[in-house]
């Protein structure tokens, strides 16, 4: 990508962030291209990972804040400019309602929902803490997938292995803590409901 080669990390951050607030950008292509460039030594793979993850989560949380503040009417008024029409928003809201809060994790992998999940979650008043944790998990998985694709395509396999090996233990500990936290909250809520 020409913008990526010219502007580097700021272009990567901006394009990924803008997608999170509902503005269609070629974020997936940019992340893959950045990882390919890292394979050729033009960019740093750890920086590509960190910037992609941070921009994805920041964009989604900014989208969440906009959805919460603006609400459905404003989203519909301005959303038409980027293809977020009332029927699409209604379908997405129904999808969220049917699938529950955990759809936030998966939404990052579904085109259309990836760009609007923050806006929708904010507009339907999903509690921010519940949104933020699930969004961070989805952002981490999405970043890992597309950076890996680009790294493999760019001949960066050894760097990926070194990076994964270096952060393997902290990642496993973090994943275990997240699973434990979700489990404890789930058990606590079930017991609370049973007492009522």
Image: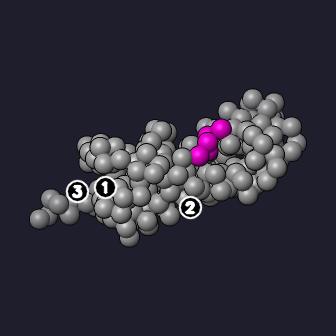
Q: Position of residue 12 (x, y in %)?
A: 70, 51
- The residue lying toward the viewer, choosing from 128 and 194, is 128
The answer to whether residue 19 is seen in the rendering is yes
Q: Earlier in the sequence, mark 1 or mark 2?
A: 2
How many marks can you see? 3
- Position of 113 with respect to 171 (left or right) is left
Q: Position of residue 117 (x, y in %)?
A: 42, 51
In the image, which residues are magenta?
Answer: 25-29
**Residue wearing tag 3:** 190
**Residue wearing tag 2:** 58
Task: Tell me where residue 153 sits by quadrant.
Answer: top right
Q: Position of residue 85 (x, y in %)?
A: 35, 47
Secondary structure of residue under mark 1:
helix
- Position of 149 with respect to 130 (left or right) is right
**Residue wearing tag 1:** 186
Q: In percent of the image, x 44 and y 67: which residue is there?
A: 65
Q: Position of residue 24 (x, y in %)?
A: 54, 47
Q: Earlier in the sequence, mark 2 or mark 3?
A: 2
Contact between marks 1 and 3 (CB within 8 A): the answer is yes
Residue 26 lies in magenta, yes or no?
Answer: yes
- The residue lying toward the viewer, choosing from 123 and 167, is 123
Q: In percent of the image, x 36 and y 63: which residue is there?
A: 74
Q: Quadrant of the N terminus?
A: top right
Task: Tell me where residue 182 sits by quadrant.
Answer: bottom left
């Amino acid at each position: 990508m020409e913008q990526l080669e010219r502007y580097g990390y700021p272009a990567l951050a901006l394009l990924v962030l803008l997608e999170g607030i509902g503005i269609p950008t070629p974020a997936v292509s940019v992340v893959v291209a950045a990882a390919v460039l890292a394979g050729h030594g033009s960019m740093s793979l750890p920086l590509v990972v960190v910037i992609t993850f941070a921009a994805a989560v920041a964009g989604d949380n900014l989208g969440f804040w906009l959805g919460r503040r603006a609400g459905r009417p404003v989203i519909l008024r301005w959303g038409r400019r980027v293809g977020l029409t009332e029927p699409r928003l209604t379908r997405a809201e129904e999808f969220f309602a049917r699938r529950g809060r955990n759809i936030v994790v998966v939404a990052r992998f579904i085109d259309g929902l990836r760009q609007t999940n923050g806006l929708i979650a904010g507009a339907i008043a999903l509690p921010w803490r519940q949104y933020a944790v699930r969004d961070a998990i989805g952002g981490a998985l999405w970043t890992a997938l597309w950076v890996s694709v680009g790294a493999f395509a760019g001949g960066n396999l050894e760097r990926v292995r070194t990076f994964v090996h270096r952060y393997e233990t902290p990642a496993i500990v973090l994943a275990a803590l997240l699973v434990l936290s979700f489990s404890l909250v789930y058990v606590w809520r079930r017991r609370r409901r049973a007492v009522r």
